[in-house]
Amino acid sequence: MGMTQHIKHIFEHFDSQSPMLSFSELVSGHINDTYLIKTAEKPDYVLQRINHRVFKDVPGLVNNKVLISKHLRKKSKGKTRRDLQRSILQFVPLKGQNIYYYKEGEHYWNMMVYIENSRTFDVVTNPKIAFEGGKLFGDFLNQTQDFDSGRLIDVIPRFHDMAFRFEQFEESLQDAAPKRLEESKLEIDKIWALKEEMHIIQKLKESGAIRTRVTHNDTKISNALFDLDNKGLCVIDTDTVMPGIVHYDFGDAIRTICNTAAEDEQDLTKVRFNYDFYEAYQAGFLGEMNQALTPIERKYLPLAAKTMTFIMAIRFLTDFLNGDIYYKTAYANHNLVRSKNQLKLIDSMTDAFAQALNG
Ligand code: GN1
Ligand code: MG
């Protein structure tokens, strides 16, 4: 079966409103495969193949996402139908009962209604986007606060757990090819040097000083949809919604919004931390979440930005040392480039925060 036939075959299991006309791949994430399905009549759809090597319990993952969408819908009673459709992901069931498609020995698929007239950003170039992103992710956390996180499965156990990421890093050092070790010597040294500071938030979490909430866990700015006037519309990619701490959602957004370049920019002179965008994001975020945060949660937001960036630096480097088995890569040193980029961003953050403190 050709690719078009295959996609069509999968699509036809879902209860869509009209038949598929064409499809294109949406080049976005590093893990799943995502396709935009154009149909004869609106709406169009987003069809997603979920990587079950990474996500061990796909039915549980899809259940998480659906529960959260339902909760958000319940909490938005005053909204118009159109606003609801544009602000909350809507999952499409199969023609049977199920909400995802799976064929033994093959893949898991799920489908959402495509939100028209929307856009995403990989790199942010104006503070309004940063502010709107803060409002959007802040609102997501605020709206899901009263959802019992015990109803969600841990999609990836210990996903943002620094101790775990360090264990994986140390294992990769044991097994890495000598050439790769040599190529990443500077980055490895940097990671060791930052180790202690980067465990502060983890320890506060373990001691219970920082509480667990429902969190998104993948709040890079490309997971926020904006309308054509750059107003924040909808939080997407809820694959990793699960119990977590507010810091990683705050930090991942800052990591991507305040980088003056993309996360895999090779020219490190282009990678700088934009402090104005940090303040803009924070203003949008606190506008929604300030009431809900405990003093200790608020106190550690700046360190969270660094910590989340560090988690990504270490994960990219670990994957490089393991021979690129986790993230999709487009060229030989792609994961090393990503890691160098994130470490450069951390240096720039350290400078920017020190400068802000000293006025
Ligand atoms: C992965 O696949 P994607 O792009 O949604 C990763 C995130 C990283 C991100 C880096 C399950 O997300 O944790 O922050 O790449 N997701 C998983 O761009 O590992
Ligand atoms: Mg994701």
Image (spheres, rainbow, N blue to C red):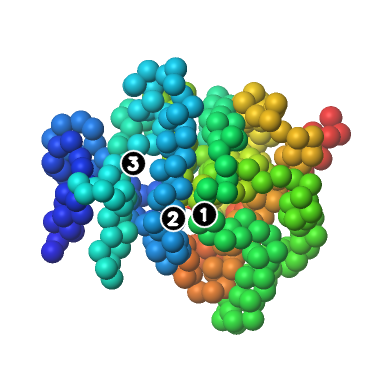
Dot in front, 2 or 3 = 2
Q: Is residue 185 above or below residue 195?
A: below
Q: Is mark 1 within 8 Å of ligand 1?
A: no
Does label 3 point to a residue whose CB lies under 8 Å from ligand 2? no
Kind of residue at badge 2: Gly
Q: Earlier in the sequence, mark 2 or mark 3?
A: 2
Q: Which residue bears the numbered disc 1?
A: 153
Q: Amino acid at mark 1?
A: Ile
Quarter holding the N terminus is bottom left
- The reply to whether residue 237 is in sight is no
Q: CA distance from mark 1 to mark 3?
A: 18 Å
Most foreground residue, 225 or 343: 225
Q: Nearer the viewer, mark 1 or mark 3?
A: 1
Q: Quadrant of residue 184?
A: bottom right
User: Mark 3 highlights which residue?
Assistant: 91
Look at label 3 and name its amino acid: Phe
Residue that label 2 marks: 60
Residue at the right extreme of this rendering: 358
Residue pictured at 28% horizontal, 60% vertical: 102
Q: Earlier in the sequence, mark 2 or mark 1?
A: 2
